[in-house]
Amino acid sequence: MQLTGSEIVIECLKEQGVDTVFGYPGGAILNIYDALYQYKDDIRHILTSHEQGASHAADGYARATGKTGVCLATSGPGATNLVTGIATAYMDSVPLVAITANVGKPLLGKDSFQEVDIAGIVMPVTKHSYIVKDVTSLAETLRKAFEIARSGRPGPVLVDITKDVTAAKTEYTPEKPKAPLRETERIREEDIDKAVQMIQKAEKPFIFVGGGAVISGAEEELKELAHKIQAPVCDSLMGKGAFSGLDPLYTGMLGMHGTKTSNLGVTQCDLLIAAGTRFSDRVIGNARNFAKNAKILQLDIDPAEINKNVLVDACVTGDLKEVLKRLNEKLGEKDHGSWLNNIQSLKEKHPLRCDDSRLTGPYVISKLYELTGGNAIITTDVGQHQMWAAQFYQYSQPRTFLTSGGLGTMGYGLGAAIGAKIGRPDKTVVNVAGDGCFRMNMNELATAVRAGIPVVELVLNNHVLGMVRQWQTLFYQERYSHTVLRDSVDFVKVAEAMGADGIRVSSKEELVPALEKALNSSRPIVLDCQIDSDEKVFPMVPAGANIEEAFDEEDL
C-alpha cells in the first residue's frame, strides 16, 4: 500500500509494539504530528514541557518496562534539546529511539532556518545515528534503529528524517519485528571452565553487581550463584534491585558513597566476581589498589569493557543471564561460613546511620520506604538525595530504581518518573529530588498535570547545591562559591501554579501525614521537605583514594 513517510513512521512504531511516545512539535516535524493525529487511537503522545523532558520520559519508560522508549522532536533547537537525554541513556545503556525531523533535502547544508546536523552531533552518544533522505529507505531504517537499540548492550539510536521525506509517498509492506536474541556467540566454554575453577578455589569470594544484571534480567541466576557459593553481594548505583537488598548476603552499595562493609569486604576478598558492571571511577576509587588482594573475574556483554578501567584475571563475554546460567550448571555448593561471619561482623560494626531525632534526608527516605513497603518505583535526580535514595531505600526487585548513574544528569528525575508511571501504571512512582535539580525540571509538573499522571515529587530542600557544598566543606575550606540557593522561590506555590498539589514539610512530625497524603493522591503532588543545609552523605571516599579509606561523620 502507498503511504506517506509520516504514515510509515507511525506504522513502524506500531510494528514495534510502541504504545506511547513523548515529544514536542515544530515546523519540520509537522507532517509526522499530523499523522499522529490520524493514529491517535493507536499511539498515545505525551506533550512534554521541554524536549529534554521528552527524552528523560522515554528513558524512564524504557528502564521501568524493559521496552524501547521513543521520543520526538523537530529540527534545530528541538533536536539539540534531546541531546542531554540521549547522552544520559547512552551512559546507562538504555534502549531509546529518538526521531527528529530536519529541513527538506534541498535546504540541507545551507544554514537554513532551524537546520542542524543532529545525526553528527549525537554520534558520540548513540549506538548509531541516521539521516533519512529517501522515503524508500525509511521503514528499513526505523526497523534497524529499534533492532540496534535493544540488541546486545542496549542504547539510544537517533533517526533524523528530512521534511520532504515525511511528505513523500512510497510502497509500504508491514513486517513482523525480529525477536531480540540473547548475545551468546562470544561465550566460550574454556572461559566458563576457567571461571568455575577460580570460583571453586576461592575462600573469600565477593560478587559485585552492576546495571547489566538488571538489563539482562539475571536476578534469579544471581541469587542462585550467591547462595550456592555463599558469597556476599554488593552493587553499583545502576545494579540496584538485581540482587535483593533484603537478602542476608547483601552488603550495600560499593564505592564513593558505598557502605564500609562493601568497601572493606571487596578489599579483603580473594575473588571478586564482577557481574554486568563497567568499573566506574566512582566505584573503584584508586584503580591501582582496587580489590588489591583479589583475583578479578569479569562477566560482561561488552568486550570493550574488559580491562578498560580495571585489569582482570579472567572474563566471560556474553549475555549475563546466559553466562550465569552456564556457571551455575557447573558449580557445586560451597561453604564459606567463616568468611560470611567476618562480613557479618563488618555489617554490625559499620551500619548506615540515620538520625531519627529530626527531619533529615535519610529519615525522609526511610519513612518513604516504610510507607511504600519497598514496592514503589523510585526515580531520582543527581546529588545528595540520589545517594540517600540508594542507601536508605531497600530495592528487592529490578527496574524499581531509576537514576542517571553515568552522566549524572540534574533534571533527569521528574521526566523519568512520568515515563515510568505511564509504563507501569500499577506502581507508585516517586521522584526524589534536591531543590537544585527541581529547578531544572519543574516545568514537567505541568506535563504530569496535563496528562493526568499522578507522580510524587519529593524535594529534599536544603536551599543549597548539597553535594557540591559537601565537597566545598570537606575539600575547599568552606568556600561556598555560588552554591547557596536561598531566595524567594516557593515550591508549594510553584506546584499549585502548575495545577498540582503542594505540601511543605518543616518537621519530622509533619512528614508521615504528608507522605501518606501524597502516596494516596490521584494527582501530581510536590512535597517540599525542609532539611538542614549542612546535611552530608556518608560514608564517603575522597576522589581517587582507595575505597577502604571511606570515612563518616564519626571518623571526622
Image: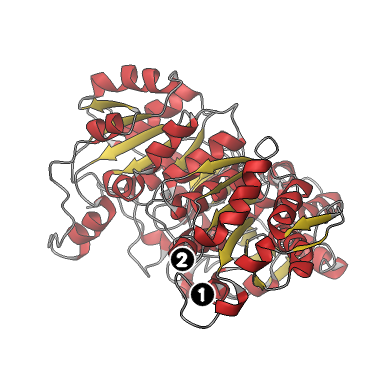
Up/down of 300 relative to 64, above or below: below
Q: Quadrant of residue 160?
A: bottom right
Up/down of 527 relative to 36, above or below: above
Q: Residue furthest bottom?
A: 110
Mark 2 burial class by Cα count in 10 Å: few <14, some 14-19, many 20+: many
Task: Identify the residue at horizontal 57%, vertical 35% (top origin).
Answer: 422
- Residue type at mark 2 is Thr
Give the image location of residue 385, x and y in percent: 35, 44
Give the image location of residue 326, x and y in percent: 83, 54
Q: In front: 261, or 451?
A: 451
Q: In front: 289, or 256?
A: 256
The colour scheme of the drawn protein is secondary structure
- Residue type at mark 1 is Ile
Relative side of 476 to 170, left or right: left
Q: Are marks 1 and 2 in contact (CB under 8 Å)?
A: yes
Q: In front: 264, or 116?
A: 116
Relative side of 460 to 373, left or right: left
User: What SS does tag 1 mark?
Assistant: helix
Q: Quadrant of residue 490?
A: top left
Give the image location of residue 436, x and y in percent: 27, 49
Judging by the rendered image, the residue that carries numbered circle 2 is 80
Dot label at residue 121: 1
